[in-house]
Image (tube, helix red, strand yellow):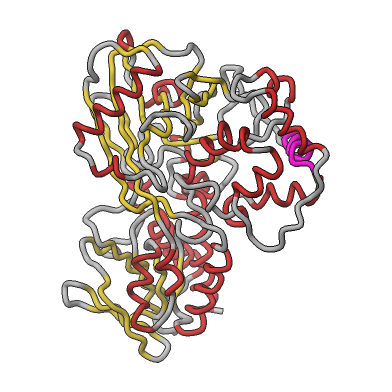
Amino acid sequence: MEDTKKVVVVGGGITGLSSAFYLQKEAKEKGYPLDVLLVESTHRLGGKIQTVRKDGFIIERGPDSFLERKKSIGELAQDVGIADQLVNNSTGQSFVLLEDRLHPIPKGSVMGIPTELNNFFSSGLFSLSGKVRALEDLVLPRSNVKGDQSLGQFFRRRLGNEVVENLMEPLLSGIYAGDLDKLSLQSTYPQFYETEQKYRSLILGTRKNAAKRPTSPAPTGKVKGQFQTLRNGLESLVEAIESKLAPGSVLKGVKVERIEKEEDQVNLIFNNGQSVIADAVIFATPHHVVSELFEPYGLLTQLKEMPSATVATVAMAFPADQVKQEDDGTGFVVSRNSDFAITACTWTHRKWPTTTPEGKVLLRSYVGREGDEAIVDLSDKEIEKIVLDDLRKIIEIDGEPEFTMVSRWKKSMHQYTVGHKQRIEKSFHEIEEAFPMVKLAGASYEGIGLPDCVNSGKKAVREVLDDLFQ
């Protein structure tokens, strides 16, 4: 009989959780002699996924949803038996706040790229010259940039500054909390480069690609939203996974302090003085944690240079009669050219009706982004006042919120700057050469969304099992 192999997963966010779950699932189904240990430095699992259930509200402190077309979270929910709890967002009009006014995002825009020109031309987001400049995309040649480039460089060349700053930047900043002129095209939206190379025009190519994509009707007859969450909050997924992990296979409140290589194994030394010898390790922690651990070996030094933005979410609850909003709105993003501290606001009670009791309104605002992070260090009261003042300039709000919940995320939004893909490939190669039994996974490397994290964990699991049992 084969010796039992010890695999340690370090980090209990969604990447580490899914890694531990799929390791145990594969071992059980295929009869692998495997002992899995999940180590988390805090006293809870889930990482940035944190749901607060309060007074009938379901409030996400961190991520609130994921793209349904990225299948891995839906499959994970199925595998842990809670797929029946998945719900899609309600669709409605989204807006951009530009110079104190909410402008509807033009119908037919795909990440800000116009595909329905009538709607684009009737939009108040751009001047006539800005609209005419965007149409130059229809005649411009393909770019001949070799290697990586910034999103700003790519999109400004194709569509001009106005479309980029008044529409694309607010949309993309909402996802990455980053600076378009620093973020990598190759590591964030390589499909737009491929569209340009294939079709030459970004507008024509995006229109053709959009026409191929099916839209599903919701039961109400409206188009089904592209995003999903869980009826009782995303933490339901964390709770379900944790309940499926083998008893005794989770160690909380313990941090890996250093690592030592012992032939083809790794010795992990914890901050409580204990240690464990592992045949394989999946590090599902942020890049700065891993780079510190491998610094004594002169490895992963390039990861130390990778910036991460600090942000905060601010949830406010009101009685419905105190807030007057656009009839069909689900939220707005804010142009950097506007004089507001908030970067976006989701009208959560509209977008996710299951989160909010009847007769209540839940507004979830965001503050902080790359280069504009000082606000996150203010007190809860100061942040609440700034956000409320901003919101009152945009929508009619009478009175004070019933409660406010501020959630800070220090250095949490990893910035995929130009050259990111090459730096990550170098990091993976270094580890493979020096510590072949170690795998890196998580939001720092190949995608920041929840499904990307699960895919990253599953990829690491496949590599570990191939190494140990093939």
- Point 68% across, 27% down: residue: 108
- Point 54% across, 74% down: residue: 426
Res 270 → quadrant? bottom left
Question: Of 470 and 395, which appears nearest the observer?
Answer: 395
Residue 130 left/right relative to 452: right
- Point 44% across, 62% down: residue: 306
- Residue 362 drawn at (x, y percent): 34, 23
- Residue 240 drawn at (x, y percent): 36, 47
Residue 406 left/right relative to 24: left
Magenta stretch holds residue 200: no
Tell me: residue 234, above or below residue 91.
below
- Residue 213 drawn at (x, y percent): 71, 36
Tell me: residue 77, above or below residue 226.
below
Q: Residue furthest left?
A: 272
Residue 119 left/right relative to 392: right
The magenta span reads 201-210
Question: Of 469 and 10, which appears nearest the observer?
Answer: 10
Tell me: residue 171, above or below residue 349.
below
- Point 25% across, 53% down: residue: 44
Question: Magenta stretch: dominant SS?
Answer: helix
Question: Of 90 and 292, which appears nearest the observer?
Answer: 292
Question: Of 33 and 60, which appears nearest the observer?
Answer: 60
Tell me: residue 470, above or below residue 21.
below
Quarter of the image with the N terminus in it: bottom left
Q: Residue furthest bottom?
A: 263
